[in-house]
Image (tube, coloured by chain):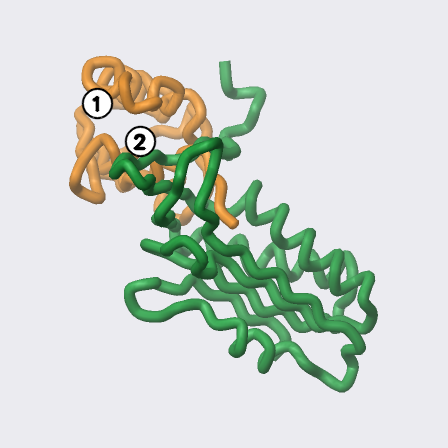
């Protein structure tokens, strides 16, 4: 198996880079690239304490698999890909997403990581609600999936 | 007729429950649902940065496919509202 995609419910489990590191090595792969996204403590000059991630589970898994398969076709069909995204409440410093790629060469490994991340931001139904030090919270704006020509 | 709107992201401000039931005239489509949603938002939720939600949201049918504005809704149909996304 060279592809693993999952949504990780933060009430049950934390995303682990160790699992990703175990998954991607192969004798065919000379390069490994791991992207880890974490919740940071500041956004738009507001002090952040945590982010809640809401996820449309079925559509996200479908999009993850499609994006990863596209990445393989585009860059390296033998690549190993481990992709997990958090669902639920994630504290500052904790992992929200991990993309680990094992590939034949470094260029493809970097490109696959970047490609997957950018595609997720535009295709996977995931939403962020930030929680702030003052107790307020806010859903962040994002990218509309409604075709642009339909938006009047 | 009535549709069951499954809420995601910022649309969760509209209800404490996962599903919001919305009354619509018979033979409604997604465009009618957008209008109804716009009315709900303008009455109660303008302070919550939701004023563009009825325009910018996409809608999924039960098969998780995006449906366009002409999509005919069935009574009691479950539709997911997909506000603008931004994971990662």
Q: Is residue A125 above or below residue B74?
A: below
Q: Are marks 2 and 1 in contact (CB under 8 Å)?
A: yes
Q: Drawn colour of chain B?
A: orange
- Where's residue A97, x and y in %? 51, 58
Q: Chain of mark 1?
A: B
Q: Is residue A148 above or below residue A62?
A: above
For residue B8, say whether it is visible. no
Label 1 belongs to which residue? B24
Element on which disc 2 rests: loop
Left or right? Give the position of B18 relative to A115: left
Chain coloured green in the rendered structure: A
For residue A117, say whether it is visible. yes
- Where's residue A88, x and y in %? 33, 55
Where, by quadrant of the figure, is residue A71 drawn?
bottom right
Q: Which mark is residue A35?
A: none
Q: Is residue B6 above or below residue A64?
A: above
The residue shown at (78%, 66%) is A76
The residue shown at (33%, 23%) is B50
- Where's residue A37, x and y in %? 54, 56
């Amino acid at each position: 198996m060279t592809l693993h995609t999952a949504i990780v419910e933060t009430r049950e489990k934390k995303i682990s880079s160790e699992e990703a590191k175990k998954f991607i090595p192969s004798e065919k792969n000379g390069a490994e690239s791991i992207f880890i996204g974490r919740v940071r403590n500041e956004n738009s000059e507001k002090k952040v304490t945590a982010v809640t991630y809401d996820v449309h589970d079925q559509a996200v898994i479908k999009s993850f698999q499609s994006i990863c398969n596209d990445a393989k076709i585009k860059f390296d069909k033998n690549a190993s890909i481990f992709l997990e995204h958090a669902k639920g409440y994630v504290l500052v410093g904790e992992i929200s997403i991990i993309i680990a790629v094992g590939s034949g060469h470094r260029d493809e490994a970097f490109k696959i990581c970047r490609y997957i991340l950018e595609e997720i931001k535009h295709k996977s139904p995931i939403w962020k609600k930030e929680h702030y030090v003052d107790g307020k919270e806010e859903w962040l704006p994002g990218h509309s999936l409604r075709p642009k020509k339909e938006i009047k | 007729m009535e549709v069951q709107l499954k809420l995601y992201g910022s649309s969760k401000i509209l209800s404490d429950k996962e599903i919001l039931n919305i009354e619509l005239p018979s033979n409604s489509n997604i465009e009618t649902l957008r209008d109804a949603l716009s009315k709900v938002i303008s009455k109660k939720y303008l302070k919550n940065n939701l004023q563009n939600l009825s325009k910018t949201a996409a809608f999924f049918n039960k098969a998780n496919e995006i449906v366009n504005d002409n999509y005919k809704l069935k009574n009691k149909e479950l539709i997911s509202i997909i506000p603008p996304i931004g994971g990662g």
